[in-house]
Amino acid sequence: MTVSAREFDAWLDRANLPTSSTEIGRVLNMRRSTIKTQRMRNRVSEDVIVGLSRSFGLSPLRSLAEFDPYYSLQSDQPPPTMAELLSQVTHTDLFAELLRRNRADMAAIIGAHYELSPIPHADGVRAWIDAIDPGSIRTEMSHHSGMATTNLSTLLSENRLPPELALLASSLAQVSLIGGLVVTGLLTPQEAGWPAQGRENALNALSDLDLIDLTDQRLKSLRRRVKKKIDAQNSAHALWETLG
């Protein structure tokens, strides 16, 4: 999803921000031609809006809500669910929690120094989709967006999800519309109003059995990703061998 050049220019004027492509490019450390092309094609990316908002001390969330595609963000959104928060905890974080709970000597070290992995993380998009899935979210996303399920699977495998699909997934799952914009990296948790220490509190609230089950799920996901990477490397090596 992108916003129209007309809306973008009107927003720049309202917010009293630079309007020339040259100045915008300088502020965002982007090429002037990139900004100019987006405006000429009438498809200004959300990254430009978020980047300008951050640079000039504006709320990226409130800025996005001023554009038609994101108008629904103006309404109050519920906080992320516990499942959403846990979806943004990595296998490394889970290992650390297991050690903390089972080794007194490690608990002293981990409790004092360990910080959860930053968002976004390597499998955060797929983990989030799985966390909010009421049962058939991939099929529903494909149906409503017109995107083939194979293409959607590819996006999730690559840990990518365009903002419009992130909003669609949130709407289908009836969770906060902001969550998908966080897990894809468009907004930070702080910008989205996620609770401070929310992930830590969700992790601490897990029973030992639930913690082990979640760790097992993440290990299986990690194995799939690593195997896919190895298979791709082997295929590339075989191709080079064939080419001589």
Image (cartoon, grey):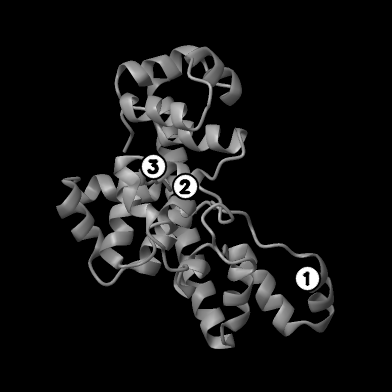
* Residue 24 at x, y percent in the picture: 53, 21
Q: Is 168 rendered above or below residue 19?
A: below
Q: What residue would you read off at disc 1?
A: 110
Amino acid type of disc 2? Arg
Can residue 186 be seen at all in this image of the molecule?
no
Disc 3 residue type?
Glu
Q: Name the residue under label 3.
A: 66
**Residue in front for this viewpoint, 171 or 133:** 171
What's the residue type where badge 1 is placed? Ile
CB of mark 1 within 8 Å of CB of mark 3? no
* Mark 2–mark 1 distance (CA, rounded to whole Å): 37 Å
Residue at 79 percent across and 78 percent down: it is 107
Given residues 180 and 129, the one toward you in this image is 180
Q: In this view, does 153 lie to the left or right of 105?
A: left
Q: Do the residues labelled 2 and 1 touch (CB within 8 Å)?
A: no
Q: Give the tally of numbered discs.
A: 3
Between 73 and 219, the residue placed more toward the observer is 73
Q: Is residue 108 left or right of residue 67?
A: right
Which circle marks residue 202 in the picture?
none
Quick one: label 2, few (<14), some, or many (20+) residues within 10 Å? some
Residue position marked by numbered label 2 in the rendering: 62
- The reply to whether discs 3 and 2 touch (Cβ–Cβ < 8 Å) is yes
